[in-house]
Amino acid sequence: MSRSYIQNQLSYFSEELSLLKNWNESELAAIFRDVGFSCLLCGRCCTTDFNGHVFLLDKDAAWVKAHNPEYLLPAPEFELIDDDGVFYVSGYTLKARENGTCPYLNHERCTIYENRFSICRIYPYMLHREPDRKKQLKFRQISGLNEHGEYNQMISDEELLKAAKETIAYESEWLSQMIDFFSAAQSLFINQGFSHVRKAYDQRIQEFRRGIPVEVYVWYQGKFVLTTVRCEEYAGFGWP
């Protein structure tokens, strides 16, 4: 099961990256212009109630490691498990406070705004496919549409093009990180004779929920980094 599952994931992310390369920055900027999003500094996007977790690219995780390593967690919803019951995940996330807010949020303001992370810089813009109501994969460009901020505002062409470039760059980096993760996992699982079995995964998650700590290999800067986590550390996410 593991080899077909991992290969399917590799094929999916590779296809996504190929499709992404066909997007023209000017066309994406035109979509952003039609939306005309303007931030109201409400801070809602910095909460797990509104946005789930903050996935950190390697360069963002490196900044947190250098300044607040205690804020790093393996990203939730681990992707794989091996025969020894060890999980594998494609990167890090920020540990949320128990109330679900970002640890860098203070009085609805980002305390590291000049050093904010890649995903925070492009939000609410995005460029990846999600299932629509008919479960067909469609490219989505805006997150949380009509749920925060102001719309139909005038935005300069320079700002729009910059946002489009940064959005395409972020999505490309994220997809590349996912491809690298599954490629490395595939090689490791083949070499070790491991199999990713969904039943074993679910059983281990149930143990995790009961308070048993688990080991997780996090994909970071081209290698797997072993860490141990407990379920309560994910309390701010409401997971698992």
Image (cartoon, helix red, strand yellow):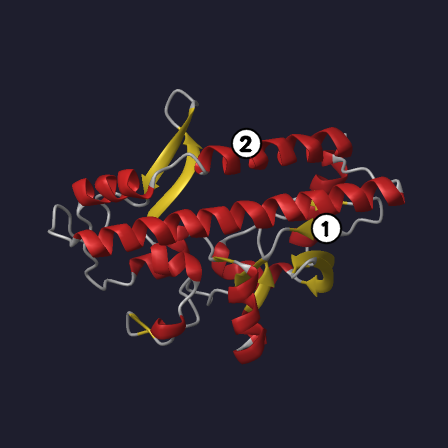
Is residue 121 something that shows in the picture?
yes
Secondary element under disc 2, as helix, strand or loop, is helix
* Mark 1–mark 2 CB contact (< 8 Å): no
Looking at the image, is 178 positioned above or below residue 130? below
The label nearer to you, 1 versus 2, is: 2
| Viewer-nearest residue: 150 or 117 | 117
Give the numbered dot on residue 87: 1
How many residues crowd around disc 2 within 10 Å: few (fewer than 14), some, or many (20 or more)? few
Secondary element under disc 1, as helix, strand or loop, is strand
**Picture residue at 28% right of the left edge, 38% below the top:** 27
Looking at the image, is 20 positioned above or below residue 156? above
Q: Position of residue 121 (x, y in %)?
A: 36, 60
- The answer for how far apart the CA atoms under marks 1 and 2 are is 25 Å
| Viewer-nearest residue: 234 or 184 | 184
Is residue 105 something that shows in the picture?
no
Q: Amino acid at mark 1?
A: Phe
Q: Position of residue 39 (x, y in %)?
A: 21, 58
**Picture residue at 84% right of the left edge, 44% below the top:** 83
Q: Residue furthest top?
A: 134
**Picture residue at 88% right of the left edge, 45% below the top:** 192
Q: Position of residue 72 (x, y in %)?
A: 57, 67
How many residues crowd around disc 1 within 10 Å: few (fewer than 14), some, or many (20 or more)? many
Q: Is residue 168 left or right of residue 65?
A: left
* Mark positioned earlier in the residue sequence (1 or 2): 2
Q: Is residue 13 left or right of residue 188?
A: left
Q: Amino acid at mark 2?
A: Glu
Residue annotated with mark 2: 15
On-image quarter of the N terminus? top right
Image-quadrant location for residue 226: bottom right
Q: Position of residue 76 (x, y in %)?
A: 57, 52
| Viewer-nearest residue: 37 or 166 | 166
